[in-house]
């Protein structure tokens, strides 16, 4: 079975497994795990932030950021199809007691003027704007890269109003691979950033949040409150270090395979929802006699796993367990399915 559902389905490499086996460990709640400390120091340096913290998942990292930045009753500005709004179970409301204020973006990128217009004025009837959240790359926009200049302009707007900015950079290194712009350049347009190590980077578990030392000190307490204080965490931090330092360098290979899928969709006569920029491909089957669920069922019968991404949208995500031969097979399946319609 060729699994293109997500880049979360990657299996740890042999090098990762060996690193986990040999990792030097200690109790991280006591601050005694040297391997996770090295990972956090490396991540902070790569993102040019004062400090970093290892967390169990990207969702936990995003929620810790919201909890640390905001107060109950605040409002959070974020793009209307952002992961934090769309896929995190209303956790910012359930845990932080804040409400979302969504802004429509262009392929996931909010216009800075629209962000400024969404900031609440001082009024007893209105919530205070406590945080602006960006997402790069943007999942539901088809892995779109949010332009650096847009992020910078948004950050300037937020700074003028004294509002912090958090970056959901779960796939930030895909943006780096696509543009050649360094992770630290993107991170300098935000106060805090979350990067996921268990998506395209292939670690078995974990994410990083980074920011000022003061932010990380408070974030550590929120991690503890959420049950994220881990013990001999070096056994997962060691493969995460390989993900951060080595696997980030090969993401362009995934992008090339995604372009091959894009080509295969066009050659077969199907349509795309968006042009491909990174490792996410979204097919639109609106002009066929199938909906997304039916298309996914047909693909699975042919040995291909994908996911419905809306009534007529199907998502494919490339990762390091996918080969050129897999994509050749997928292209043949597309042609066969189109001929059968």
Image (cartoon, rainbow, N blue to C red):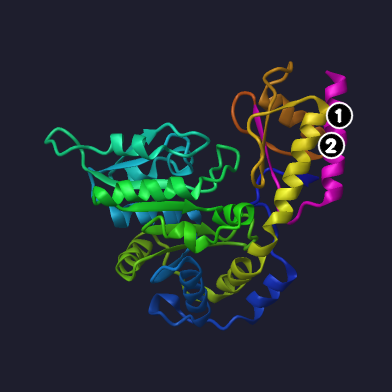
Say if the magenta span includes residue 333.
yes
The mark found on residue 30 in the picture is none
Residue 260 placement, left or right of 339: left
Q: Which residues are magenta?
A: 313-341
The mark found on residue 335 in the picture is 1
Q: Residue at x 82, y 44 (%)?
A: 327
Instruction: Name the foreground residue: 334 vs 8.
Output: 334
Residue 158 versus residue 246 in the image, above or below: above
Specify few, some or many for label 1: CA neighbours under 10 Å numbering under 14, 14-19, or 20 or more.
some
- Helix, strand or loop status at disc 2: helix
Instruction: Name the foreground residue: 112 vs 51.
Output: 112
On the rendered image, what quadrant is the N terminus found in? top right
The mark found on residue 331 in the picture is 2
Specify few, some or many for label 2: CA neighbours under 10 Å numbering under 14, 14-19, or 20 or more.
many
- Residue 160: where, in percent of width, then height? 25, 49
Say if the magenta span includes residue 103.
no
């Amino acid at each position: 079975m060729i699994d293109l559902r997500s880049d979360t389905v990657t299996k740890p490499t042999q090098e990762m497994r060996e690193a986990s086996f040999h990792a030097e460990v200690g109790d991280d709640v006591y601050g005694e795990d040297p391997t996770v400390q090295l990972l956090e120091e490396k991540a902070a340096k790569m993102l040019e932030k004062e400090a970093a913290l290892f967390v169990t998942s990207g969702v936990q990292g995003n929620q810790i950021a919201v909890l640390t930045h905001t107060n109950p009753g605040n409002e959070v500005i974020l793009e209307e199809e952002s992961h934090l709004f769309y896929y995190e179970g209303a956790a910012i409301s359930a845990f932080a007691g804040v409400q979302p204020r969504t802004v429509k973006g262009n392929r996931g990128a909010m216009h800075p003027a629209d962000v400024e217009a969404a900031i609440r004025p001082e009024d007893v009837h209105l919530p205070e704007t406590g945080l602006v959240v960006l997402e790069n790359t943007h999942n539901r926009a088809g892995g779109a890269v949010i332009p650096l200049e847009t992020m910078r302009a948004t950050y300037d707007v937020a700074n003028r109003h004294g509002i912090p900015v958090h970056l959901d950079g779960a796939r930030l290194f895909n943006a780096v691979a696509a543009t050649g712009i360094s992770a630290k350049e993107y991170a300098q347009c935000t106060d805090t950033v979350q990067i996921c190590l268990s998506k395209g980077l292939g670690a078995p578990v974990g994410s990083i949040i980074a920011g000022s030392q003061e932010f990380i000190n408070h974030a550590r307490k929120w991690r503890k409150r959420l049950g994220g204080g881990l013990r001999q965490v070096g056994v997962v931090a060691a493969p995460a270090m390989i993900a951060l330092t080595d696997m980030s360098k090969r993401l362009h290979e995934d992008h090339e395979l995604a372009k091959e899928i894009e080509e295969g969709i066009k050659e077969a006569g199907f349509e795309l929802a968006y042009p491909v920029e990174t490792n996410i491909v979204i097919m639109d089957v609106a002009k066929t006699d199938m909906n997304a669920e039916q298309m996914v069922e047909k693909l699975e019968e042919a040995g291909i796993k994908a996911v419905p991404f809306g009534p007529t949208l199907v998502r494919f995500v490339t990762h390091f367990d996918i080969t050129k031969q897999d994509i050749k097979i997928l292209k043949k399946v597309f042609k066969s399915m189109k001929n059968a319609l």
